[in-house]
């Protein structure tokens, strides 16, 4: 490479590119021809489907138009028949008034003729519908035949396309193989020439390297002789030095033996002292065992007292639970009565409103009609009917107060918390600066929303997730929450509060149950009951360590301090909600949330009350539907007509 230089390398690369152009060109041409053939064959095959789709669309359009015409004809026929039937039925009352037999006979003949005409029209309509049904059956048979023909044509074209593609693929493959074989032969010839030239250059280089190696061998022999003489001298000096070191080490060994003898005598003395201490410890241990037995007796007495107290408290809890159920039933009955009375009051209010509103609008329409006659007949001016907002209203005014959406509330909350944490050095002070959210800590809500956005990525589309990667953490969390709320149908602020409250209640119940299972307490009333350790035999308790009994007594005192699961849920720290529980909590929330949405919202709206601030404005507008200028115009016209 050094002898040839860089120019030779560039030449070789250019030659390789020239060699590859022929095969690549052949491959590209074959690929283009095959792609064109495939496109044309696919278009030929899909033309059958396109034609079938076009026919089906045209048939459906014609069918829809015929159906509309048939429905319209049936409706018109029903209306006319109903009118004729009413006319026939109305004449039966006249038959009772007839006293002359001839008139009654004529009336009966006339009724019979009309009934016969009505039945003939019905039979005619039924015949037309049967004829249409028969024509539809024929069209259906024709369509099936046409579809079978299309399928045969499609299969023939597909088979022909497959045969053409196989034939062309074989032809193009042979062309590509020929191009590669030609290039291979050319490459073999070029490489053979290069190989012979390289072998000749390598032989010349080997001869030069052999001469240089002979010179180096002679120089290395001279250096080895010099190193041998130098090594003999160094060996003699090192031998004398090592002999002196051996003498000093023997002296040190004698000193170590003397020290070992002295340490052995000290250890024997210490062993005797430890034996005496062991005897004293045995005596103390027997005393401690006797004391431990006394403490076990005291513990058993305390456990019996505890069991008695637990029984008493359990009975009291059952009584309280029965009272609670009774009070809850009374409360539900009272709420039911409230909803009933609220619904009836709302219905009565709506009826009175509609009655007064209809009367007022009737007067307004009479006034508008009089004004129209005055303008068109008396004044000769064009008249346009006024368009007031209160004329389009029907029924009581509705409340148009809208609550902020869940996404907007979550965005405001996360933004406030981020700004508060970034602006203050202490996060606890920043939490105090932000007002609480319906007795729920904003830090807790922020933690829950972040966990939901991190663990609910399966509710977000993959395209949106790829677009969110370059964004910041705050913006990415907001977009994720928006998509998750849309998937879970969480729209309003109340829905968001229900979600957070459900998370806290669910996690608090889980924590209480785990503590109950670990400590041996009753989950219904949170009162301690004897655990399995308290029910063991006294013999096994005597074998336990005293430290375990003291720890057990301490845990028993702590069990009594457990709070009820119905206590304050919003005071739980946000770390109680773990990432592993997010999917399970969301699943339970969606199931219960659908049930909550299925309830009757009308009773809640009636109990909540309505906004009556705009009622006076509405009735005042109805009372002043005719403006003051219009009244002055009427007065002036009245005076002018009286003078006339």
Image (cartoon, grey):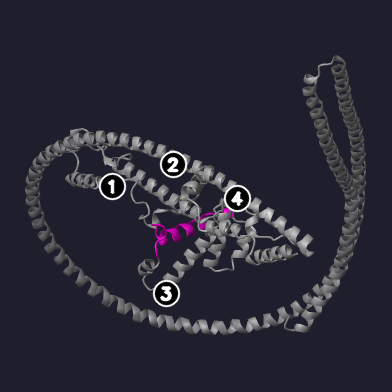
Q: Earlier in the sequence, mark 4 or mark 1?
A: 4
Q: Is residue 334 left or right of residue 137?
A: left
Magenta stretch secondary structure, dominant = helix
**Viewer can see residue 467:** yes
Q: What's the distance in space between the residues labelled 4 and 1, CA to CA?
A: 61 Å
Q: Quadrant of the C terminus?
A: bottom right
Which image quarter: residue 535? top left
**Tag nearer the camera, 3 or 2:** 2
Q: Which mark is residue 362?
A: none
Q: What's the distance in space between the residues labelled 3 and 2, CA to CA?
A: 49 Å
Q: Residue at 84% across / 69% down in the picture? A: 20
Q: What residue would you read off at disc 4?
A: 357
**Tag nearer the camera, 4 or 3:** 4
Instruction: Name above or below for residue 151 compared with residue 96.
Output: below
Q: Which mark is residue 338?
A: 2
- Start-end of magenta stretch: 435-459
Q: What's the distance in space between the residues labelled 1 and 2, CA to CA?
A: 37 Å
**Tag nearer the camera, 2 or 4:** 4
Q: Is residue 120 left or right of residue 470?
A: right
């Amino acid at each position: 490479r050094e002898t040839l230089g860089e120019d030779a390398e560039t030449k070789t690369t250019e030659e390789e590119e020239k060699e590859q152009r022929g095969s690549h060109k052949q491959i590209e041409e074959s690929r283009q021809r095959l792609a064109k053939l495939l496109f044309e064959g696919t278009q030929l095959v899909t033309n059958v489907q396109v034609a079938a789709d076009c026919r089906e669309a045209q048939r459906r359009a014609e069918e829809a138009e015929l159906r509309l015409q048939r429905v319209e004809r049936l409706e018109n026929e029903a209306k006319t028949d109903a009118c004729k039937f009413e006319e026939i039925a109305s004449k039966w009352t006249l038959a009772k008034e007839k006293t002359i037999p001839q008139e009654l006979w004529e009336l009966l003949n006339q009724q019979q003729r009309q009934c016969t005409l009505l039945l003939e029209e019905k039979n005619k309509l039924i015949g037309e519908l049967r004829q249409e049904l028969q024509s539809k059956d024929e069209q259906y048979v024709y369509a099936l035949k046409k579809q079978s023909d299309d399928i045969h044509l499609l299969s023939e074209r597909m088979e022909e396309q497959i045969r053409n593609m196989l034939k062309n693929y074989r032809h193009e493959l042979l062309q590509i193989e020929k191009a590669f074989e030609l290039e291979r032969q050319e490459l073999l010839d070029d490489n053979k020439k290069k190989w012979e030239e390289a072998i000749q250059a390598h032989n010349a280089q080997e001869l030069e390297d052999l001469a240089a190696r002979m010179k180096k061998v002679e120089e290395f022999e001279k250096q080895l002789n010099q190193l041998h003489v130098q090594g003999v001298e160094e060996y003699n000096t090192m031998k004398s030095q090592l002999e002196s070191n051996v003498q000093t080490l023997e002296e040190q060994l004698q000193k170590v033996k003397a020290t070992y003898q002295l340490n052995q005598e000290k250890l024997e003395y210490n062993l005797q002292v430890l034996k005496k201490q062991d005897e004293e410890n045995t005596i103390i241990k027997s005393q401690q065992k006797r004391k431990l037995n006394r403490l076990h007796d005291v513990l058993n007495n305390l456990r019996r007292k505890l069991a008695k107290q637990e029984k008493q408290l359990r009975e009291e809890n059952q009584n309280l639970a029965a009272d609670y159920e009774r009070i809850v039933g009374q409360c539900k009955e009272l709420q039911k009565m409230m909803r009933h009375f609220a619904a009836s009051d709302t219905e009565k209010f709506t009826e009175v409103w509609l009655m007064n509103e209809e009367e007022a609008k009737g007067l307004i329409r009479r006034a508008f009609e009089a004004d129209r006659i005055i303008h068109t007949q008396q004044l000769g001016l064009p008249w346009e009917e006024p368009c007031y907002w209160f004329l389009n209203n029907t029924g009581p005014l509705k409340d148009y107060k809208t609550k902020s959406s869940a996404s907007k509330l979550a965005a405001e909350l996360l933004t406030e918390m981020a700004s508060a944490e970034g602006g203050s050095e202490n996060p606890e002070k920043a939490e105090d600066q932000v007002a609480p959210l319906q007795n729920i800590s904003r830090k807790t809500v922020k933690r829950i929303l972040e966990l939901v956005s991190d663990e609910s990525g399966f509710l977000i589309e993959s395209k949106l997730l790829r677009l969110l990667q370059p964004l910041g953490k705050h913006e990415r969390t907001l977009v994720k929450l928006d998509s998750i709320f849309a998937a879970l149908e969480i729209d309003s602020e109340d829905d968001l509060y229900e979600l957070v409250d459900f998370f806290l209640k669910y996690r608090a119940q889980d924590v209480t149950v785990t503590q109950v299972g670990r400590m041996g307490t009753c989950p219904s009333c949170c009162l301690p009951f004897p655990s399995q350790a308290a029910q063991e035999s006294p013999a096994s308790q005597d074998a336990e360590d005293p430290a375990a009994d003291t720890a057990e007594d301490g845990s028993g005192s702590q069990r009594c301090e457990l709070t009820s699961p119905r206590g304050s849920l919003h005071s739980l720290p946000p770390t109680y909600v773990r990432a592993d529980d997010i999917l399970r909590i969301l699943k339970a929330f969606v199931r219960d949330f659908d049930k909550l949405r299925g309830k009757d919202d009308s009773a809640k709206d009636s109990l909540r009350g309505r906004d009556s601030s705009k009622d006076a404005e509405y009735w005042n507008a109805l009372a002043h539907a005719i403006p003051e200028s219009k009244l002055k115009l009427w007065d002036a016209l009245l005076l002018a007509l009286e003078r006339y």
